Image: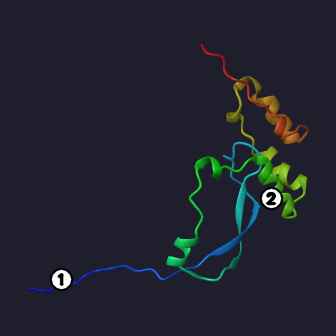
């Protein structure tokens, strides 16, 4: 008969990386510019798991995690992006599925010509049948 071996797992340090934010390309971003993480990063000093657990902030709720489009725009502009760089990709990623069929084609045409402000774009509510 073989002796039972006690198995265990342990953790020592947590290694953090700080990434640079950049303009994203996620077409499912409902409003405003999407954000992505750049490949550029800075390695931060490691911290023990125990120290991290003692100092970490409380977990955020879904409402606290949500980042309004105006805040994303400010982050990008503070990071050196120009308005034209931010808003051109938004206009080219709008899809007709985002609008009801009666207004999809004219608004998509305007989006591609960049002659309107995407922040004033309103969706019409469908009439109940």
Mark 1 is surrounded, within 10 Å at the Cα level, by few (under 14), some (14 to 19) or many (20 or more) other residues, namely: few
Please state the horizontal and vertical placement of residue 83, each as a whole percent of the image.
89, 53
Q: How many numbered callouts?
A: 2
Label 2, label 1: how many angstroms apart (C-alpha)?
56 Å
Give the residue pinned by disc 2.
Answer: 75
* Residue 112 place in picture, x, y as percent: 84, 41
Residue lying at the far left of the rendered structure: 1
Q: Which residue sits at x=80%, y=48%?
A: 70
Q: Position of residue 60 (x, y in %)?
A: 59, 55
For image coordinates 66% across by 17% down, the residue present is: 127
Answer few, some or many: residues within 10 Å of disc 2's Cα (few below 14, many 20 plus, some between 14 and 19). some
Badge 2 or badge 1: first in the primary sequence: 1
Give the vertical position of 95 relative to 85 (above or below). Answer: above
Find residue 22 and report its image quarter: bottom right
Q: Quadrant of residue 113?
A: top right
Q: Residue at x 59, y 13 (%)?
A: 129
Relative to 109, does residue 33 appear above or below in the rendering? below
Element class at badge 2: helix
Task: Find disc 1 in the rendering and name its residue.
Answer: 4
Picture residue at 72% right of the left edge, 39% below the top: 95
Compared across the picture, whether 47 is left or right of 7 comes to: right
Going by the picture, which residue comes out furthest to the front?
54
Q: Which mark is residue 37?
A: none
The correct choice, above or below, for 3 with respect to 36 in the image is: below
Q: Is residue 1 left or right of residue 129?
A: left
Which of the pair 52/108 is nearer the observer?
52
Residue positioned most to the top: 129
Determine which quarter of the picture holds residue 19.
bottom right
In this rendering, position of residue 2 left or right of residue 30: left
In the rendering, at what x and y percent does residue 35 appear? 72, 57
Task: Give the secondary structure at mark 1.
Answer: loop
């Amino acid at each position: 008969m073989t002796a039972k071996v006690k198995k265990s797992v342990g953790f020592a340090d947590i290694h953090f990386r700080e990434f640079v934010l950049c303009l994203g390309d996620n077409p499912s971003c409902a409003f405003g510019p999407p954000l992505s993480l750049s490949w550029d990063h800075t390695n931060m000093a490691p911290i023990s798991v125990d120290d991290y657990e003692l100092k970490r902030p409380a977990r955020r709720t879904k409402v606290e995690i949500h980042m309004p489009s105006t805040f994303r725009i400010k982050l990008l502009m503070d990071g050196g992006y120009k308005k034209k760089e931010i808003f051109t990709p938004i206009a080219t990623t709008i899809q007709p599925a985002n609008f009801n069929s009666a207004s999809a084609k004219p608004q998509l045409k305007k989006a591609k010509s960049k002659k309107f402000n995407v922040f004033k774009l309103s969706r019409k509510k469908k009439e109940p049948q």
